[in-house]
Image (cartoon, grey):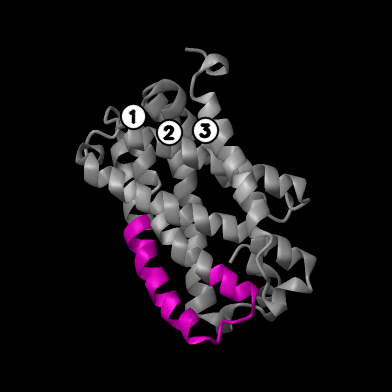
Amino acid sequence: MPPLLHPALPLLLGATLTFRVLRRALCRLPLPVQVRADPLRTWRWHNLLVSFAHSIVSGIWALLCVWQTPEMLVEIETAWSLSGYLLVCFSAGYFIHDTVDIVASGQARASWEYLVHHIMAMGAFFSGIFWNSFVGGGVLTLLVEVSNIFLTIRMMMKISNTQDHLLYQVNKYVNLVMYFLFRLAPQAYLTHFFLRYVGQRTLGTFLLAVLLMLDMMILIYFSRLLRSDFCPERVPRQQHKDKFLTE
C-alpha cells in the first residue's frame, strides 16, 4: 500500500502528538537552579526529559519484544510481532517530534548531528513500518535505548553542573558498560548481518548504508565519551564549556 494511504500513519501521528503533549507536561516540572537562568539550558533540559522518558519506555519495550519473539535475533528481515511493529511506530513518532522540536527551537545548527541521526533512523524505521520488512532489525536497533537511559542521566547532570556528585561518578561506569552491551554490541551484530546485502539493489543495501553511517557516528560519540569522562585533562577548557549539548 502506498505510504500516503498506509494505516500506520495514524499511529505515527498519534505517537508524535503524544510526545508533544508529554513535553508540555514535563515543562511544568521545577528546574535545577543552574538550568533555569539559561534559556538554552532550559530548552535542552526539557528536550532531555522527553528523551529520557522515550528511552525508558522503548528500551524496556525492546527487551520485552526480544524476550517474547526471540527469532528476531536471527530472522532480522522476516521476524515480526505486533508489539515490535508498534514499538517501531512509537519510536519513529519520537524522532519526528524531536526533529520538529530542534528545528522549531532554532537549534538546528547547534544540534545538526542529532538531526542527521534522526533522519537516518526514521528512514530505517519507515522500511519496517510501510513495507513490513526488517521489523526485527528495528527492534534490535532500539536496544540502544537501554544505554540511552544512562547516557541521558549523564548529560542532564552535566547541564546542571553536578559532575562532582557521587551519582555521576557511579553512572559514568554504568554508562560505559551499557554502551558496550546495548549500543556497540547490537550495532556490530546488525552490521555483520547486513553485510550480506553488499552489491544487491535491495532494501537491505539501503539499510546497510544507513547502518554504516550510524556506526561511524556511534564510534565518534564513544571517543568523545571516553575523552570527556575518563581523560578530561585532554579536553580543552572552552570545549568543557560549550560541548555539553553533544557530549
**From the viewer's perspective, is 101 left or right of 148?**
right
At numbered mark 3, what does the secondary structure look like: helix, strand or loop? helix
Q: Quadrant of residue 82?
A: top left
Give yes or no for residue 166 being in the magenta stretch: yes
Q: Residues within 10 Å of mark 1 (few under 14, many from 20)?
A: some
* Labels 2 & 1 near each other (Cβ < 8 A): yes
Q: Residue at x 53, y 86 (%)?
A: 165
Q: CA distance from mark 3 to mark 1?
A: 17 Å
- Looking at the picture, does residue 175 appear above or below residue 214? below
- Please report the bounds of the magenta region as a residue range: 154-182
- Looking at the picture, does residue 216 appear above or below residue 235? above
Q: Which labelled disc corresponds to residue 197?
A: 1
Magenta-drawn stretch, dominant element (helix, strand or loop): helix
Q: Residue at x 51, y 18 (%)?
A: 6
Choose mark 3 or mark 1, whichever is in front: 3
Q: Earlier in the sequence, mark 2 or mark 1?
A: 1
In the rendered image, which residue does mark 2 sit on? Answer: 207
Q: Of the residues shown, which amino acid type is indicated by label 1?
A: Tyr
Q: Of the residues shown, which amino acid type is indicated by label 2?
A: Leu
Q: Position of residue 122 (x, y in %)?
A: 53, 36
Q: Quadrant of residue 183?
A: bottom left
Q: Which labelled disc corresponds to residue 123?
A: 3
Seen from the viewer's position, the closer of residues 184 and 50 is 50
